[in-house]
Image (cartoon, rainbow, N blue to C red):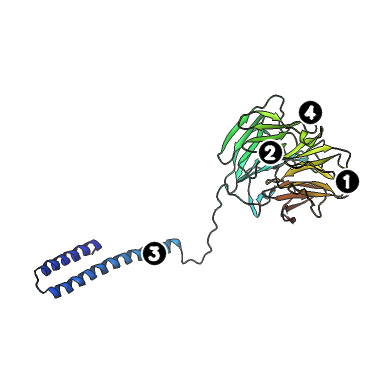
Amino acid sequence: MSTSRLDQLASAAADELLNTAATGTDTVARRAELDRVRRNRRGVRLTAVAAVMASVLIVLLVEGNFFSNSNPQPMKPLPGIDVGDVPVWYDDAGLHRGNIVEQTPVELRQLDGMAIEDGALALVRNGALYLDPATGDVWFHPWGGDPRIVGQDSTTGPSGNPDGDIAAWFEGGHLVVYDTAADRVIARELPFWKVERAFGSNTCHAMCAEHAQPGNGFLLVSAERVIWNSSPSGEGHGPSNIYDVRTGQVSVADTKSVGRDEAELVDVSDDAAVYSVQDKSLWGWHLVLDIPGRAPQEYAEVNPRSRFSPSGNYLTSVGARAEGSGERVSAAIIDTRTGELWPVPETRYSWSAWSYGDIALVQQEDELLACDAALRTCETLPAEPPFLMPTN
């Protein structure tokens, strides 16, 4: 019998008792009987509710497999997750982000005759961009998601902002600025005829072979501006160009702040900059750090091939261990807030780059180190040469 039918019978019985009680016949006995009916009706309702709840619980336990002794399955990573401050690099095993390896749809290194031709690897907040050296396609690879082509026939790039969502590259003579979070191109410009595309390594001076991590000339990529170095002559640095994303205008960076006519812009972080200044030192040029509110700081024994960390708090380069020695060199990390230099121990003839946060990657022959610039510690990564480091 259904719960609603029981309720109807109980209500009818209660009404009958109430009518009888109103006549004054057997008043006490009738009231006692009325109380008993009411209690029974409440008991019927509670029993029905308990039965329904028990049925639901049994279904949940069976379908949810709560009695199973199996281990819970790991949650699938969300596309475009923020991976935190971890080292990122590429080798034959795939694209590494910390302890996780993701496969790429194309090879980022390929043989061109007897030489290895590299693509480019750049980081944004929730993923990586890379260049297919075989086709010139630019891919966006959201962490934990499916890679997709976002650019074609790229001549230079890509580059990105590890703390943001913006990336940039050149397609022919056009500068492309792309928002990875919104999945749309926010600017596609053909700069003035006199403005050349980004050239060579971001830290190339006259020769691009020694201590220079392969790059693509981009110094800063943001939603407000893009800065890159160009070389009209094909040798050394040409002017450093600034593209204003809002206005579409291109200007040339002013290097007069360091007080040297021959100064060349090497990298930028917000309003801070690092320059290459020619001299007669060990390298033939040296690094000058220009921080707003402070006098330019010169590092006579530090190679100017350098990059700011994503936070701008550190600068990685190559420093000489001894004056006059061209062989005893090490990776060097400068704290831009204090100016203090830390020679990375046990490194020599190295190449360096930045991953997320303040994690520097230092390549030494066939070994790749991840160095925490804040803690001043390094560990060897399980990287198999040849490997590719980010260009940011």
Q: What residue would you read off at disc 2?
A: 220
**Furthest-right residue in this view:** 324
Which quadrant of the structure image shows residue 138? top right
Q: Dot 2: within a 10 Å radius of its alpha carbon, few (fewer than 14), some, or many (20 or more) residues?
A: many
Q: Are marks 4 and 2 in contact (CB under 8 Å)?
A: no
Q: Is residue 201 visible?
A: no
- Work out whether residue 161 or residue 215 is closer to the camera in this orientation and state it: 161
Q: What residue would you read off at disc 3?
A: 57
Q: CA distance from mark 1 to mark 4?
A: 28 Å
Q: Dot 1: within a 10 Å radius of its alpha carbon, few (fewer than 14), some, or many (20 or more) residues?
A: few
Q: What amino acid does circle 4 point to?
A: Ser
Q: Secondary structure at mark 4?
A: loop
Q: Which mark is residue 93?
A: none
Q: CA distance from mark 4 to mark 2?
A: 22 Å
Of tags 2 and 1, which is closer to the observer?
2
Q: What residue would you read off at disc 4?
A: 233
Q: Secondary structure at mark 3?
A: helix
The disc, 3 or 2, on the residue closer to the chain's N-terminal end is: 3
